[in-house]
Image (cartoon, helix red, strand yellow):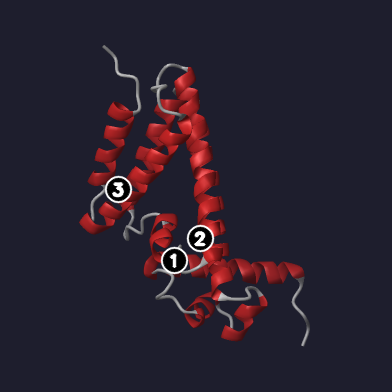
Amino acid sequence: MARKSSADMEKTRQAILDAGLSLLQERGYNATGIQEIATAAGIPKGSFYNYFASKEEFGAEVIRYYARDGLEKWQAALVEAAGKSEPYSALYQVFLEVTEKYRCADVKKGCLLGTLSAEISEASEECRLALKESIDAFKEVLAAYLAKGQEQGKVRREITAGQMADLVWDAWQGSLLRMKVEKSVEPVKTDLAVIFQHLLGVQKN
């Protein structure tokens, strides 16, 4: 039997990641089995191990894959929004745009990083490290935009940009969990308004 080319191997690996990502978003990590992932990707179960040594390794790769794609899209949206307004307002606007996408989704899946942080961060060190790496990348961008806001006098200065990035991220993830419970994006919009309009921004007299 002829061996697959490297291009075919990469294509199959991508199919496994895409199938696994969809299943993890719908069911979570623990409720998703390797057989289900393989079936969804159109490969025999045994072939899964040609690409990933274990489900744990696969989970870490899905986390990184999801985060890379999400971060690229988020940064592109920020750059576009920043071209129309100053960085702090652009940051708030993009959060609102993402919220509207959740409103239009048939299934409110929330953020995979937040969902898996609650589910497997203590059970898998490999996945925990992938989650931390991914979350840190998002918070680094957050901090950079908040720092620009401080430089322009739009954001309060008595709190560091890094501390504010932690606060925004934590509030965002918490509001996404409430969104899933209440089946409404209103908790997300309310929290964003409080954070960006009242807590972090410099108040006008």
Circle 2 sits on which residue? 128
Residue 156 vertical placement versus 112 (above, below): above
- Could you tell me which residue is drawn at 28 percent across and 44 percent down? 188
Residue visible at 65% across and 73% down?
A: 51
Q: Which residue is mark 3?
A: 175
Of labels 3 and 1, the one closer to you: 1
Dot 3 or dot 1: first in sequence order is: 1
- Write down the residue under mark 1: 120
Q: Is residue 62 left or right of residue 169?
A: right
Secondary structure under the numbered disc 1 in the rendered image: helix
Q: Secondary structure at mark 3?
A: helix
Using the image as rendered, state which of residue 94 and residue 49 is in the foreground: 49
Residue displayed at 57% across by 84% down: 45
> Which three-letter amino acid code belongs to the residue tagged 3?
Ser
Residue 13 in the image: state x and y as whole percent: 63, 69
Of the numbered discs 2 and 1, the one sitting upstream in the chain is 1
Whole-percent x and y of residue 22? Answer: 45, 66
- Mark 2: which amino acid? Arg
